Image (cartoon, rainbow, N blue to C red):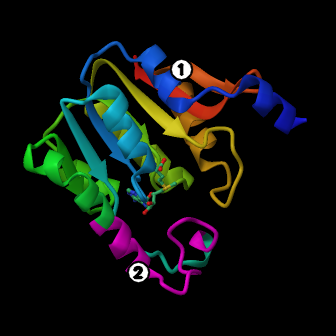
Amino acid sequence: MKKIFKKLFLVDRIDLIKKNLKKKNPFSLEIGVHRGDFSKKLFLNFRPQKLVLVDPWMVFNELIYEKSWYGNSDILGQKKQDQYFEEIKSYFKKEILNNEVEVCRSTSDVFFINNKYKFDLIYIDGNHLYDFVKKDISNSLNFINKEGIIVLDDYKLKGWWNDGVTRAIDYFIKTKKIKILEQHNLINYHHQCILQKI
Ligand SMILES: C[S@@+](CC[C@H](N)C(=O)[O-])C[C@H]1O[C@@H](n2cnc3c(N)ncnc32)[C@H](O)[C@@H]1O
């Protein structure tokens, strides 16, 4: 049944962001980059004034991360993460030199401690566990411009993260700190949630 809804009502996440983001050339942040597939799309579609990419590119040994993209089940382990980091730096070589792209190899928590920028678009797709997503949203609310949007991936999607994304968003809805502009449902199928600071 879900497959039928997906086929009929799938919305591309770039189109969804385009619909909700007013600012041209948005100052942008992506938390959780992996191989940079979405970073490339963000850069090509929005031509951001600056795109900051944050990821530790680090293998996590704890059992809970076994099924994640950064668990230690792969035989190449850390070598693979190092390779992804080198590939992304190489892909954006020119933009890094031109100060259009910044690649920050750290967790989002550490990044926010030192951050001096304010963003128009923040895409949260890092550690999906509840406490981490909660911290990412909380930090993002401190560094988002007026009319800026915060987008979360894997909303209303159950996985090894035990619904951490959805539960963290629910927490902020209860505290009345955010309003929801878009959320995934069966006839608006994208597993994204777009928030704005109240
Ligand atoms: C699902 S992948 C990101 C995919 C990417 N956004 C895309 O759409 O192609 C999740 C990434 O989050 C990173 N990550 C894990 N913990 C993190 C943290 N605390 N801060 C930032 N990134 C983290 C992982 O290294 C992994 O590359």
Which residues fall within the magenta stretch?
Answer: 65-86
Mark 1: secondary structure = strand
Position of residue 103 measured from the top left corner of the image (x, y, whole percent): 23, 54
Q: Residue at x 74, y 23 (%)?
A: 9
Q: Is residue 84 magenta?
A: yes
Name the one closer to the observer, 155 or 20.
20
In the picture of the structure, the residue carrying the numbered disc 2 is 78
- For this orientation, the residue located farthest to the bottom is 75
Q: Quadrant of the N terminus?
A: top right
Name the one closer to the observer, 55 or 94.
94
Q: Residue at x 30, y 58 (%)?
A: 88
The verdict on label 1 being within 8 Å of ligand 1 is no
Name the one closer to the observer, 181 or 138.
181
Asked whether residue 117 is in view, the answer is: yes
Q: Where is residue 7, by image quadrant?
A: top right
Ligand 1 shows up in the quarter that is: bottom left
In the picture of the structure, the residue carrying the numbered disc 1 is 180
In the displayed structure image, the side of residue 164 where residue 188 appears, left or right: right
- For this orientation, the residue located farthest to the right is 1
Position of residue 119 measured from the top left corner of the image (x, y, whole percent): 25, 30
Q: Is residue 94 magenta?
A: no
In the displayed structure image, the side of residue 137 where residue 156 appears, left or right: right
Whole-angstrom CA distance, mark 2 to mark 1, is 37 Å
- Crowdedness near tag 1: few (<14), some (14–19) or many (≥20) residues, C-alpha within 10 Å: some
Q: Give the residue type that dot 1 points to.
A: Ile
Q: Give the residue type that dot 2 points to.
A: Gln
Mark 2: secondary structure = helix
Position of residue 131 measured from the top left corner of the image (x, y, whole percent): 50, 53
In the displayed structure image, the side of residue 150 where residue 87 appears, left or right: left
Residue 158 vs 7, above or below: the answer is below
2 and 1 marks in contact (CB < 8 Å): no
Q: Residue at x 15, y 40 (%)?
A: 100
